[in-house]
Image (tube, helix red, strand yellow):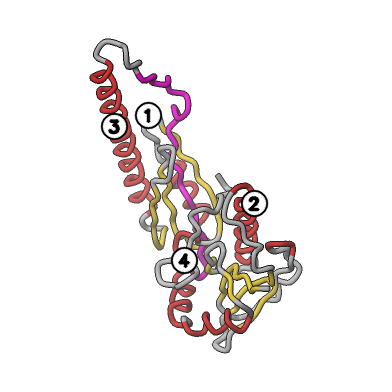
Amino acid sequence: MATYLYCVLAPPRIDAAPGLPGIGGTPVRAIVTPSGLEAWVSTIDEGAVRTSGRALAEQALLHNEVADAALATGRTPLPARFGSQFADDATCIAHLEQHHRALSAALTRVADAVEMSVLLVPVERGRANPRTSPRRDEPAAGRRYLEAVRQRTRDEERRRAVAASMAGRITSTVASIVRGESRDAGTADILSVAHLVGRGEVDRYRREVTAVVPEAGYRIVVAGPRAPYSFAAESAPLVGHDSSSPNRDE
C-alpha cells in the first residue's frame, strides 16, 4: 500500500476531506505535518496509478476533482502532480516537512486566489481542406511537396503570431487584476493563457476578457475557476501542475 498525495493546504484545518472518493475508490483524508501543513491523501495499492490510456485520464480527472473540492472549502490548495505517492503517511509527512518553507511560500502566493484560463482557439481548426501529398510519379512531385511543407510552416507561424498578439492584448487588459500568468502553446494550434486571480476578482476578470475582440479566425474561451495547477510548480517540490490532466472546464 502507498500514500497518494492530492494537494497541500495552509492552516487552519477544515475537516472536509473525509468521505471524498479517491483513486482506487479509497476515501480521501487529511493528514497534518508538525508545522501545520495539511495534506489531502488516500491509501492506494502501489500499482493503482495508471500511466496511459483511458484509465490515466479518468484518474487524472479524479485527482483534479479532489483538488477542486479542496478549493471549494474557501482555502486555495497547492495541487500535487498527478502520480505523487509515498511509501506511507510518515514518509509523506517527512517530505512535506522537509520542504515546509518552499510549500508555505507557494501557499502564501496562491492564498485566496483561483486559476482562470483563456483559450485562444482557431475557428477553422479541423475544417480546413486537407492537403494531399503528390504521388511520386507526378511531374515535379518533389518540388510540390517542398512547397506544401513551406506553406504549412508559414501558416503555422502566422497562427502562432496571431495568437501571441491576442494573448498580449489580453495580458494588458487584465494586468491590474491578475497576480501571475502562465502560457502554454499546447497542441492543435490552441494557445492557453492561465492567470492567478483573486477570488473576489473573478467576475471582473470574465467581463474584461470577454470584452476583448478576437482576431479574425479565432474565438476566445474563458475557463475556470479551478485550483492553481499552473502556478504550483514554480517554488514547491512535488506539488506541481500535471500537464497530462484533462481540463474539465474546456
Location of residue 21 by image quarter = bottom right
Residue segment shown in magenta? 111-133
Mark 4 and mark 2 lie on one chain; the one further toward the N terminus is 2
Q: Secondary structure at mark 3?
A: helix
Q: Secondary structure at mark 2?
A: helix
Q: Which residue is mark 1?
A: 216
Q: Are marks 3 and 1 in contact (CB under 8 Å)?
A: no
**Which residue is the extreme one toward the bottom?**
34
Mark 1 and mark 2 lie on one chain; the one further toward the N terminus is 2
Q: Which residue is mark 3?
A: 153
Vertical comparison of 142 with 82: above or below: above
Q: Which residue is mark 4?
A: 232
Disc 4 crowd rating (10 Å Cα; few below 14, some 14-19, many 20+) is many
Q: Secondary structure at mark 1?
A: loop
- Disc 3 versus disc 1: distance between alpha carbons? 20 Å
Image x and y of residue 128, in percent: 43, 23
Mark 2 and mark 3 lie on one chain; the one further toward the N terminus is 2
- Disc 4 versus disc 2: distance between alpha carbons? 24 Å
Q: Which mark is residue 238?
A: none
Q: Which residue is mark 2?
A: 55
Amino acid type, residue under disc 3 in the picture: Thr
Mark 1 and mark 4 lie on one chain; the one further toward the N terminus is 1
